[in-house]
Image: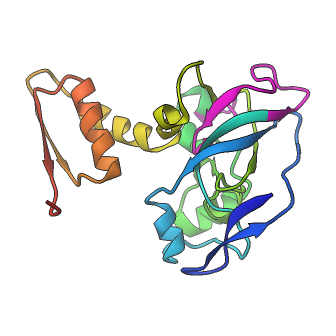
Amino acid sequence: MRALRYHGKHDIRCDTVPDPEIEDQRDVIIRTTACAICGSDLHLYDGFMPGMKDGDIMGHEFMGEVVEVGREVRKLKVGDRVVVPFTIVCGACEQCRRGNFSVCERTNRNADLARTAFGHATAGLYGYTHLTGGYPGGQAEFVRVPYADVGPVKVPDGLSDDKVLFLGDIFPTGWQAAVQCDIQPTDTVAIWGAGPGGQFAIRSAVLLGARQVIAIDNVP
């Protein structure tokens, strides 16, 4: 398959690599139908984030069609369309049971390395350094998705990729920012930065009932 791979600061190439395979019977393989470049991918591109290795596959905002299913997968079948969240979660550890999915205790294969670097570990993340597990990302023709009964979101019939791709990362990011403000119907909400993340925070604040939303940016 073809995939975008990291080869050093400011060096991303489209390479031919082996197709992913089922490694655990809770995995599925998806054929990517849409993916995006996240602002945080620029931290990798610019060399700000440690833990990248030559040949790592980039990308954590992606969706696609299930083409292969492990024997223990119950909720997905070949042909299903899914959006895959950035965070890889097991759904069964103590933190997942509490709803703290971003710190799933099982999916970061290099959790000790992350604790050494940052003082704490996150869950495993797609395409985002070996400090978060070293999982191949979604800027590729095919992607292995672990714990497939937990993370992926099925796409209802009739919705195009363009309408649902953002559920994987950027819309939940904006939504969480707005939710944490505990917005009340009389509130005026100010959002600094009207780029893509800011746009989803703006829309989330409106959906959550803010009286007015003010966007602040230095770009006209």
Q: x%, y% of residue 220?
A: 13, 60
Image position, residue 170 (x, y; %): 43, 44
Q: Quadrant of residue 73?
A: top right
Closer to us: 173 or 80: 80
Q: Residue at x 61, y 32 (%)?
A: 96
Residue stretch rendered in magenta on the structure: 67-95
Q: How is the image coloured?
A: rainbow
Magenta stretch mostly in which secondary structure? loop
Is 90 part of what is drawn in magenta?
yes
Q: Residue at x 72, y 25 (%)?
A: 80
What is the x, y in percent for residue 71?
91, 27
Residue in front for this viewpoint, 140 or 172: 140
Q: Quadrant of the N terminus?
A: bottom right
Pick the residue in front: 27 or 110. 27
Q: Position of residue 22 (x, y in %)?
A: 88, 43
Q: Is residue 75 magenta?
A: yes
Q: Is residue 151 left or right of residue 118?
A: right
**In this view of the protein, can residue 150 be seen by the observer?**
no
Residue 71 higher or lower than 40, as above or below = above
Looking at the image, is 52 positioned above or below residue 127? Answer: below
Instruction: Please tell me how many numbered marks the rendered image carries.
Output: 0
At 67% from the left and 29% from the top, the residue drawn is: 81
Residue drawn at (62%, 80%) of the image: 8
Extreme residue in the right direction: 71
Q: Judge whether 145 appears above or below 131 on screen.
A: above
Query: Can I make out residue 83 in this image?
Result: yes
- Left/right of residue 193 with respect to residue 17 in the rendered view: left
